C-alpha cells in the first residue's frame, strides 16, 4: 500500500474512533453522599426566583444549602439552571410534563446534587425526584392589577369555598400562567373557569411586572413571590384570593441519593432546634409567619 493510501486509511480510522468516543454517554459522578464527600463539593442547582435564590449570591435557599455544605464538611457550589431543565440536571433524565403526568425522555448529563429554589412539591415532581422534609409553606393566589374591577374576595373561613369564589372571578378575563412550574395552568384547571389563559414566556419573577405593565389583567403567583411583589410594587397589584390549598416547598434530590437526602433531613431538624432555620426565614420572608403560623410553629 502506498503512503498516500496509508494516510487516507489512518485518517479514516481516526475519524471512526472519534465518532465512537463521541457516541459513548458522558460519565458523571453520582450525587449520593459518598460521592459528594469524595468530590469535596456540594453542587446546588438553583433557578433565580423570589428571595430563595436572588441571583446575587444570596437568598433563603442559598444560605440554607451553604450551611448544609458546611455541615457535611465540603465546599459549596451554586449551579444556575432553569425550570425547563432542572429535573434533568439533577436526575440525568430529561422529562416532559403535561398537568400531573410526566414522561421520561433522553438521558442528559447530571450537573448538580440537589435542587433548592422554592421548589414546590407537586404530584408530577414526586414521580421523578425525592423530596426532603418541607422547608417552606406556599399557596397559589390570584393577583390582579390594582385598577382591575375585580375585588378581593371576602374570606369565608373555608379554603375550598374561597377557592371557588376566587376562580369564579376568572371568567372572560386574561390571566397569565407559566408552564413547567408550580404555576402551570393545567395544575389548577384554569381553562375550565372560562378564563383566557396565556402561557407567559418570561420568568416567574417577571409575572407581576407583566400584569402591572398591562400584558394581562391577572396572573397566578405563589405566596412567597406574591409577598415580595406586594412589598416591591405597593399599590400596583392586589390579591383576589386563593386558587389552591396550602402547598409545601422542599429540597429535591435524585432518587439515587438516599443517603444525601437523609443527611439533609437531619441537618434541617438540627436547624429547627438551634434556631438557625428561623433566622434565615425572618431575614428573607419576615411576614411569612403571619400567613402560615401553623407551619412555623415549633420551628
Image (spheres, rainbow, N blue to C red):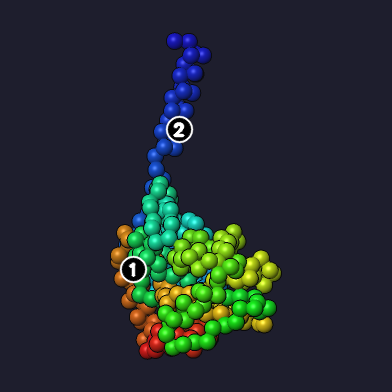
Q: Is residue 283 visible?
A: no
Tell which of 241 and 94 is nearer to you.
241
* Residue on which the image places disc 1: 261
Judged left or right of residue 204, residue 258 is left
Which residue is most to the top?
Answer: 1
Give the Cα separation between the discs numbered 1 and 2.
39 Å
Q: Could you say whether the residue bearing mark 1 is in a helix, strand or loop?
A: helix
Residue at 50%, 68% in the rendered image:
193
**Residue 19, picture quadrant:** top left
- 231 versus 172 height, above or below: below
**In the rendered image, which quarter contains the C terminus?**
bottom left
The local crowd at label 2, few if under 14, some if 14 to 19, many if 20 or more residues have their Cα within 10 Å, is: few
**Residue 298, picture quadrant:** bottom left
Tell which of 190 and 299 is nearer to you.
190
Residue 30 x/y as whole percent: 35, 56
Residue 101: give its label: none
Q: Is residue 220 visible?
A: yes
The local crowd at label 1, few if under 14, some if 14 to 19, many if 20 or more residues have their Cα within 10 Å, is: many
**Residue 65, picture quadrant:** bottom left
Residue at 43%, 60% in the rendered image:
99
Residue at 69%, 69% in the rendered image:
213
**Earlier sequence position, callout 1 versus callout 2:** 2
Q: Could you say whether the residue bearing mark 2 is in a helix, strand or loop?
A: helix
Labels 1, 2: front one: 1
* Residue on which the image places disc 2: 18
Residue 26 x/y as whole percent: 41, 45
Residue 234 x/y as whole percent: 66, 82
**In the rendered image, which quarter contains the N terminus?**
top left
Residue at 39%, 56% in the rendered image:
102
Residue 13 x/y as whole percent: 43, 24
- Whether residues under marks 1 and 2 lie with C-beta atoms below 8 angstroms apart, the answer is no
Amino acid at each position: 500500500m502506498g503512503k498516500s493510501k496509508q494516510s487516507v486509511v489512518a485518517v479514516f480510522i481516526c475519524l471512526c474512533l472519534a465518532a465512537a468516543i463521541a457516541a459513548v454517554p458522558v460519565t458523571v459522578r453520582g450525587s449520593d453522599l459518598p460521592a459528594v464527600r469524595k468530590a469535596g463539593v456540594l453542587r446546588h442547582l438553583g433557578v433565580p426566583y423570589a428571595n430563595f435564590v436572588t441571583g446575587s449570591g444570596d437568598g433563603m435557599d442559598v444560605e440554607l444549602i451553604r450551611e448544609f455544605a458546611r455541615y457535611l464538611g465540603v465546599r459549596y457550589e451554586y449551579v444556575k439552571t432553569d425550570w425547563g431543565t432542572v429535573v434533568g440536571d439533577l436526575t440525568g433524565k430529561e422529562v416532559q410534563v403535561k398537568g400531573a403526568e410526566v414522561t421520561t425522555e433522553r438521558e442528559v448529563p447530571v450537573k448538580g446534587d440537589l435542587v433548592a429554589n422554592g421548589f414546590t412539591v407537586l404530584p408530577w415532581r414526586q414521580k421523578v425526584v425525592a423530596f426532603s422534609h418541607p422547608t417552606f409553606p406556599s399557596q397559589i393566589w390570584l393577583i390582579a392589577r390594582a385598577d382591575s374591577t375585580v375585588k378581593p374576595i371576602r374570606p369565608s373561613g373555608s379554603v375550598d369555598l374561597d377557592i371557588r369564589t376566587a376562580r369564579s372571578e376568572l371568567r372572560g378575563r386574561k390571566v397569565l400562567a407559566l408552564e413547567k412550574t408550580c404555576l402551570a395552568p393545567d395544575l389548577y384547571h384554569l381553562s375550565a373557569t372560562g378564563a383566557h389563559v396565556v402561557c407567559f414566556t418570561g420568568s416567574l419573577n417577571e409575572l407581576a411586572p407583566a400584569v402591572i405593565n398591562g400584558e394581562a389583567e391577572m396572573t397566578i403567583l405563589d405566596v412567597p413571590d406574591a409577598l415580595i411583589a406586594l412589598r416591591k410594587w405597593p399599590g400596583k397589584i392586589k390579591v383576589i384570593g386563593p386558587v389552591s390549598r396550602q402547598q409545601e416547598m422542599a429540597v429535591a434530590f435524585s432518587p439515587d441519593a438516599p443517603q444525601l437526602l437523609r443527611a439533609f433531613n437531619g441537618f434541617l431538624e438540627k436547624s429547627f432546634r438551634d434556631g438557625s432555620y428561623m433566622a434565615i426565614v425572618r431575614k428573607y420572608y419576615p411576614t411569612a409567619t403571619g400567613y402560615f403560623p401553623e407551619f412555623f410553629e415549633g420551628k
